[in-house]
Image (cartoon, rainbow, N blue to C red):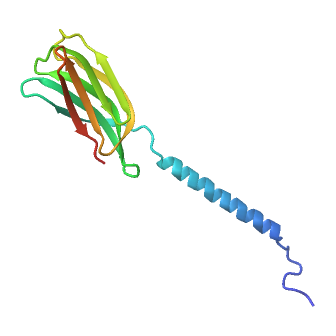
Amino acid sequence: MRSVHDGAPKRSFQGRSRARALAAAGSLLAAMFVTVGLAPTAARADTTVGGCTGLISGNCVQATTGSKNFQNHTQWVGWVRSYGWGGSNGIVKLESWSSNFYFSSNVNPNDVNPYREWGAQRWVPSGSGVCSAATYTDGYRSVACITIQV
């Protein structure tokens, strides 16, 4: 008596296991490509936001922000600026900071409206302040902040 499989090539169990392993490896590789494609990387920073202190003169903070990562609740901060406005002079130091960066620079107190800019190039968590401070010759320190919201 002949079996239904007689005469036809038989597929071994080992061959089926190899096919399943290749299919699983292909799925894993595809998932890795998708994951890498969605991973947060440096983003283009194209929006400027800022805030200032003082009524007729003071200091300001500006941040050039970019993409928001809603999974990690972060936003890209490309550049941050600290500067005096309204004819401010007597500033000896400008600073800018957030949760994961800090920059400072001494400035000439005779400069009017001194300005410093730094490349933060960081993902900043939602709820974090991006701040700047101006320290004056008499020790007075003025702080301005904006808040990252994702």
Q: Quadrant of the N terminus?
A: bottom right
In the image shown, does 40 or 93 lie closer to the viewer?
Answer: 93
Residue found at the very far left of the displayed protein: 56
**Vertical arrangement, residue 19 with respect to residue 74, above or below:** below
Residue 27 is left or right of residue 121, and the answer is: right
Could you tell me which residue is drawn at 42 percent across and 37 percent down? 42
Q: Quadrant of the rendered structure where residue 64 is?
A: top left
The residue that appears at 6% across and 24% down in the rendered structure is: 56
**Residue closer to the observer: 29 or 137:** 137
Residue farthest to the right, as pictured: 1
Which x, y percent locates residue 37?
50, 48
Q: Is residue 68 left or right of residue 138?
A: right
Please give the name of the residue rendered at 17% of the width and 17% of the height, measured from the top-left corner.
113
Q: Quadrant of residue 117?
A: top left
Q: Is 147 placed above or below 17 here?
A: above
In the image: residue 2, left or right of residue 47: right
Residue drawn at x 19%, y 11% is 111
Residue 83: x percent and y percent? 21, 22
Vertical arrangement, residue 27 with respect to residue 60, above or below? below
Residue found farthest to the bottom: 1
* Residue 131: % across, % down: 26, 32
Can you give x and y, in whole percent of width and height, for residue 127 in the image? 29, 45
Count of labels shown?
0
Residue 111 or 13: which is nearer the viewer?
111
Above or below: residue 92 compared with residue 49:
above
